[in-house]
Every structure is written in structure tokens, then in C-alpha cells.
Amino acid sequence: MYEDSFGIALSLFTIFLNAPLPILSLVLFTITFDLFAE
């Protein structure tokens, strides 16, 4: 569980750094977080 969460967090962090628009990364993070909330 922790390994998967870490991998996803790392992926989100990478997307955040590489995303052309910070808003885009924020939306992706919010959607992913919402999926995990359920």
C-alpha cells in the first residue's frame, strides 16, 4: 500500500514539475486525490 502510494506521489510530483501549466497538474492531482478518497 505504501509503495503504491509513494510511486503515485512520485509520479504526481514529476508531472507537477514537467507540466506546461501548473493548473493542469493541480487538476490532475485533485482528480487523483479524489479517487483515493473514495
Image (cartoon, grey):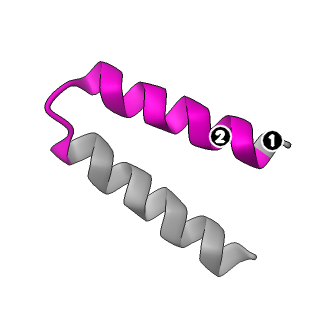
Categorize mark 1 by other alpha carbons within 10 Å: few (<14), some (14-19), many (20+). few
- Residue farthest to the right, as pictured: 38
- Judge from the rendering whether residue 5 lies leftward or rightward of residue 37; answer left or right: left
Residue 33 lies in quadrant: top right
27 or 17, which lies in front? 27
Answer whether residue 33 is magenta in the image: yes
Q: Residue at x 62, y 80 (%)?
A: 3
Asked if residue 32 is positioned above or below residue 31 in the image, the reply reads below
Q: What is the span of residues highlighted in magenta in the rendered image? A: 18-36
Q: Which residue is mark 2?
A: 33
Looking at the rendered structure, the kind of residue marked 1 is Ala
Residues at discs 2 and 1 in contact (Cβ within 8 Å): yes
- Judge from the rendering whether residue 23 lies leftward or rightward of residue 32; answer left or right: left
Looking at the rendered structure, the kind of residue marked 2 is Phe
Residue 38 lies in quadrant: top right
- Judge from the rendering whether residue 17 lies leftward or rightward of residue 36; answer left or right: left
Residue 16 x/y as whole percent = 30, 41
